[in-house]
Image (tube, rainbow, N blue to C red):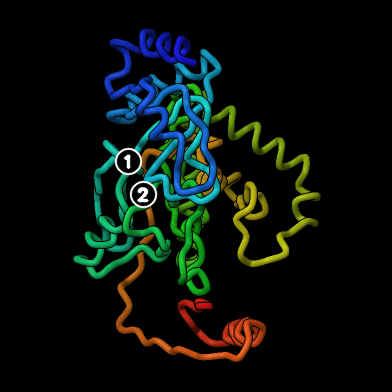
C-alpha cells in the first residue's frame, strides 16, 4: 500500500491543489468514523474546491481507485471509511452562499449547527434535525438522507432538496434540479412552468449527465412493474436506493435519487434546500409507562395527533 500511495502522490503533484496525505498517521486517523468499522485508506485528499475535486475524481476513475466521501464522520454504519481515497469535504466547502425567503444555498462542508444559527437570524430553519447536528455536515446529511427526532412530522432531508451541485465519477459537474421539491407547494400552472424549466435544463446537460440520465431511465423503465409492486413496508425507510418516488412528469429526478446514496452515485458539493419558519412555540409532555410494550403502543396511538416528535427513553 505504501508504494501505491507514493505513486498516487507523485502523479497528482502539480495537478491537485488541495492537501493529499499518504502518511501512516493520516491513514490511521481516517480509518475510523463513529461506527465500529476500521478500514485503512490508501490516501486522504482534502480538495480546495469543486475544480480541485474534479481533477482528483478523474484521476481515480482512470486508475480504478475507489473514492469515499467524508463529512464529519458521524455515521454509525461505516459510510465514511474505505480502502481507496478518502475525500474530506468538511474543510474547504464551508460557504453559505445565499439565504432566500424560503430556501438556502449551502456547500457540503457546512455544519448543520452553523447553518441553523444563520437561518435562525432570518426566522427560518432546516426541518430535519439530526442528533449529531452539532458537528455533522450538510453533505453528510444529504448522503445519508438524514432526519432527526422530528421525522414524524417533517420527514427526511430528501423532501427539502431543491437542487444539487454534483461531480460524477469522471469529474464532470452537473446541476441537478429536483422537480418534485416544491410540487406540494406549487399551483398547477406553476408546476407546469417548473416542469418546462426542468426539461430545458435537462436538454443542456453534459455528456456524462445525459448518459447517466438515459441509463437510469432505461433501467427503471425495464423494472418499473417490479418497483411498483414491491413498495417499502414502512413509512420510515432509509435502506438502499429509493426508486419508488423518483419518477416525475418531467422525467427521472436524479437529485432525489442521489439523496441517501452515500456518495456511491456522485459527490455532492453544494445544495439548495427548502427551509421552513421557526416554530412559534413548543411544549413537552412526559409520560411514564409500566412496560416497554405499553410505551410503544402509546407511541403508535400518538400518530393520530399533530406531534412534531415522539422519543422513547428507557
Image coordinates for residue 28, horizontal then vertical, percent: 41, 31
- Judged left or right of residue 218, residue 22 is left
Front residue of 247/197: it is 247
Secondary structure category for the residue under label 2? loop
Numbered tag placed on residue 245 in the rendering: none
Q: Is residue 224 above or below residue 116?
A: above
Q: Is residue 227 above or below residue 65?
A: below
Front residue of 162/134: it is 134
Q: Residues within 10 Å of mark 2 (few under 14, many from 20)?
A: many
Q: Residue at x 62, y 60 (%)?
A: 237
CA separation in Å, label 2 and label 1: 7 Å
User: Which quadrant of the figure has residue 13?
Assistant: top left
Label 1 belongs to which residue? 90
Q: Residue at x 51, y 51 (%)?
A: 76
Image coordinates for residue 65, horizontal then vertical, percent: 52, 20
Q: Residue at x 63, y 86 (%)?
A: 291
Image coordinates for residue 225, horizontal then vertical, percent: 80, 50
Secondary structure category for the residue under label 1? loop
Q: Is residue 308 above or below residue 221?
A: below
The mark tally for this picture is: 2
Q: Is residue 22 above or below residue 303?
A: above
Q: Residues within 10 Å of mark 1 (few under 14, many from 20)?
A: many
Q: Is residue 178 visible?
A: no
Q: Is residue 64 visible?
A: yes
Label 2 belongs to which residue? 137
Front residue of 65/76: it is 76
Q: Residue at x 29, y 58 (%)?
A: 113
Front residue of 64/7: it is 7
Mark 2 / mark 1, whichever is N-terminal? 1
Q: Dots 2 and 1: beta carbons under 8 Å?
A: yes
- Judged left or right of residue 298, residue 65 is left
Image coordinates for residue 236, horizontal then vertical, percent: 61, 64
Amino acid at each position: 500500500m505504501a508504494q501505491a500511495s507514493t505513486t498516487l502522490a507523485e502523479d497528482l503533484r502539480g495537478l491537485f491543489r488541495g492537501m493529499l496525505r499518504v502518511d501512516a498517521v493520516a491513514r490511521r486517523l481516517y480509518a475510523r468514523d463513529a461506527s465500529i468499522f476500521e478500514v485503512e485508506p490508501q490516501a486522504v485528499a482534502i480538495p480546495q474546491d469543486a475544480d480541485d475535486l474534479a481533477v482528483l475524481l478523474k484521476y481515480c476513475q482512470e486508475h480504478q481507485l475507489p473514492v469515499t466521501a467524508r463529512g464529519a464522520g458521524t455515521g454509525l454504519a461505516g459510510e465514511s471509511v474505505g480502502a481507496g481515497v478518502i475525500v474530506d469535504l468538511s474543510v474547504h466547502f464551508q460557504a453559505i452562499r445565499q439565504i432566500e425567503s424560503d430556501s438556502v444555498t449551502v456547500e457540503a462542508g457546512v455544519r448543520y449547527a452553523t447553518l441553523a444559527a444563520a437561518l435562525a437570524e432570518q426566522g427560518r430553519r432546516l426541518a430535519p434535525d439530526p442528533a449529531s447536528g452539532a458537528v455533522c455536515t450538510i453533505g453528510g446529511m444529504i448522503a445519508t438522507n438524514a432526519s432527526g427526532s422530528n421525522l414524524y412530522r417533517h420527514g427526511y432531508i430528501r423532501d427539502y432538496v431543491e437542487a444539487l451541485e454534483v461531480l460524477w465519477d469522471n469529474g464532470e459537474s452537473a446541476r441537478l434540479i429536483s422537480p418534485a421539491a416544491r410540487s406540494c407547494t406549487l399551483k398547477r400552472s406553476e408546476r407546469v412552468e417548473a416542469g418546462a424549466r426542468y426539461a430545458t435544463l435537462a436538454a443542456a446537460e453534459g455528456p456524462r449527465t445525459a448518459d447517466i440520465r438515459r441509463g437510469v431511465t432505461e433501467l427503471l423503465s425495464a423494472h418499473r412493474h417490479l418497483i411498483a409492486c414491491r413498495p417499502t413496508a414502512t413509512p420510515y425507510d432509509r435502506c438502499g436506493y429509493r426508486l419508488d418516488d423518483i419518477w416525475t412528469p418531467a422525467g427521472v429526478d436524479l437529485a432525489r435519487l442521489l439523496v441517501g446514496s452515500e456518495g456511491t452515485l456522485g459527490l455532492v458539493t453544494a445544495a439548495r434546500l427548502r427551509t421552513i419558519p421557526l416554530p412559534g412555540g413548543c411544549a413537552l409532555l412526559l409520560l411514564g409507562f409500566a412496560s416497554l410494550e405499553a410505551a410503544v403502543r402509546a407511541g403508535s396511538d400518538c400518530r393520530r395527533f399533530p406531534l412534531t416528535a415522539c422519543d422513547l427513553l428507557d
